[in-house]
Amino acid sequence: MAAEKAAPKEDGKKGEPSKDDAKGKKKEEKKEAELSDEDLALKENLELMVTRSSDSKAGVAKLAMETMRSEIKSSTSSMTSVPKPLKFLRPHLQTLKDTFAKMKKPEENKKLLADIISLLAMTDAPVENVMPESLKYRLLGSDEDIGTWGHEYVRNLASEIGTEFHRRQEEAGTDSMQVDNEDLMGLINVIVPFHMKHNAEPEAVDLLIEVERLDILADHVTTANHARTCLYLFSCSSYLPEPEDAEVLKVAHAIFMKVEKYTEAMRVACRLGVQETMEQTFNAADDKLVKRQMCYMLARHGHPLKLDEGPCEVTDGDELEELQQIMSNSNLSANYLTLARDLDVMEAKLPEDIYKTHLIEGRAPAGAAVDSARANLASTFVNAFVNAGFGQDKLLTTSEGAEGGEGDAGAGSNVSWIFKNKDHGKMSAAASLGSILLWDVDDGLPRVDNYLYSMEQQVVAGGLLAVGLINVNVRNDCDPAYGLLYESVNKEDSSVRIGAIMGLGLAYAGCQKEEVQELLVPIITDESVPMDVVAFAALSLGLVFVGTCHEECVQAIVQALMLRPEKDLEHPFTKFLCLGLGLLFLQRQAEVEATLEVAKTLCPRVSEFLQVTLEVCAYAGSGNVLKVQAMLARCGAHPDLDGDETAEGEEPAAGESGEVESKEWLPPPPPIAAP
């Protein structure tokens, strides 16, 4: 009986709703209770419109869709809330999709419904290998302005276009060029103008880069938004692989040309380093002042144009002379000194003014000052840099005064300071005069000329180097630097040869002067020439033909590295050979790959150093993130030095004292600080 009585109770419990269902209903009732009367009315109205959108009568269905569209467009949202019409319609998305699938006529109603579904599908999770639904229904929708649906909707479409474009490319595989993207391009041609008009230039650029159609960007740029657009293009170029980085810069150049900002266009052309682009930019400008500004820019970047003939020919004689003078940097020294006078910094400084040793306690000299060759050499360099280009200083260009007599005053330099140095210090002291007289060819060369006839070979070498420094980046029809230096390149003394070779490298840096190549290549390939002379010859060639990948220069340096005996490659100056080769590929990026492969076959002593140097020079200033990461990985790697330590440890066994004696000068290790 107990079992019979219990059974009905159990049956009764089964018929009752479960606790979970009851809780769910209570939550729904609570949510509905939380809605205001206005929101509740809106929800009920939208649900009614969803039902009526599937009505058999086309007019009723159209009215329902128009009502939903107007409610969505008129709704507002905040940073923390979703527009209420979207929130109320989202649960009915599948219903609307089913209605769209069943709907056949009229076509206008289908397009109106597709617009609504496209907006509601923004929150759908993407499905792999399938077109995103928001984009799919947008392509099936009406042709009205998509901007009326809001900026966030347009941004979502742009991201889905990029996803769909790459999906199609992957599916096509090797035939990716044959993919039909006309439907996407129709939408892109609507989105890009919208972004450009609403201060969203970076988003427009990103979209066009994704679909590989950056060439149409210039059509939508105006004088109002060109600055922001080009600034973003410059930023993008640093993170794009080649040749895409150059393509981005070409688009920036086209934009500047379109809005007639020729000086900015010339800046981009100089960065591209393409002669035809520079010539095109120069010819596009009609304003004489703008042309002068471009001449200053070209002179500064070392890309002079031929103005007396060729595509950039200037017919006006007076204007031609003025522009050639600017581009040759003939007035560079005078302009620099004018700026120095305006800033009131013309007064020459002594090295002591830089050291400020009198401010350091315990450093005051106790007795008479004693000359030190090392201290004098340091003062020579400090003096050369701090007074560079000013044409005067208090060590070299100041005569001895009454004691020096007229002869010293005529020489225009303090010769006694040079002889306070020893050996190579004399060469540095004489060469430092070139730094002080930087760019002043007319006045500087006569003042250096005396050093070229000195009995001291080191002083002659310094004088030759000073000639090169004075002529740095200055073009002169008389070509005085080459006339003074070329004979000394083949002198017997190595110091004089090095001074002349480096003088040529500095004087004609970036000029691609063929006479220098004809003079220096035989020196590099001659195995009887000392290694230090060969190294500086390679470095000078790298300076003169910097960034040109000059074939003969590359072959000469590679040949020297391959054919020189291993003993020569142990010379410290071998690194200058590698640097000279690297300079030839400066900023040329992928063009260095073939030479890198050759570098891997060289002697292990120079192979790795040469590879790093070539990569660093080739990608200098490119902002290539992958190369930066590779270089950081090299910095973090610790080479295995066990073999070197063993070899070094075996040497003292023969002499018993080599290792100990070689380290006697080392200071004791510092104490380890307590934690």
Image (cartoon, rainbow, N blue to C red):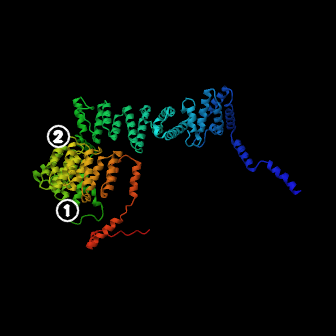
Amino acid identity at mark 1: Asp
Q: Which residue is at 72% across, 43% downward?
A: 29
**Residue 438 visible in image:** no
Q: Residues within 10 Å of mark 1 (few under 14, many from 20)?
A: few
Residue 309, given in percent of the width and then of the height, sits at: 23, 32
- At mark 2, the secondary structure is loop
Per the image, the residue denoted by label 1 is: 371
Q: Residues within 10 Å of mark 2 (few under 14, many from 20)?
A: few
Viewer-nearest residue: 305 or 335: 305
Viewer-nearest residue: 360 or 42: 42
Quote the CA–CA distance across marks 2 and 1. Answer: 42 Å
Extreme residue toward the right, this view: 1
Q: Which residue is at 20% across, 56% downward?
A: 530
Q: Quadrant of residue 150?
A: top right
Q: Is residue 108 left or right of residue 484?
A: right
Q: Is residue 160 left or right of residue 497?
A: right
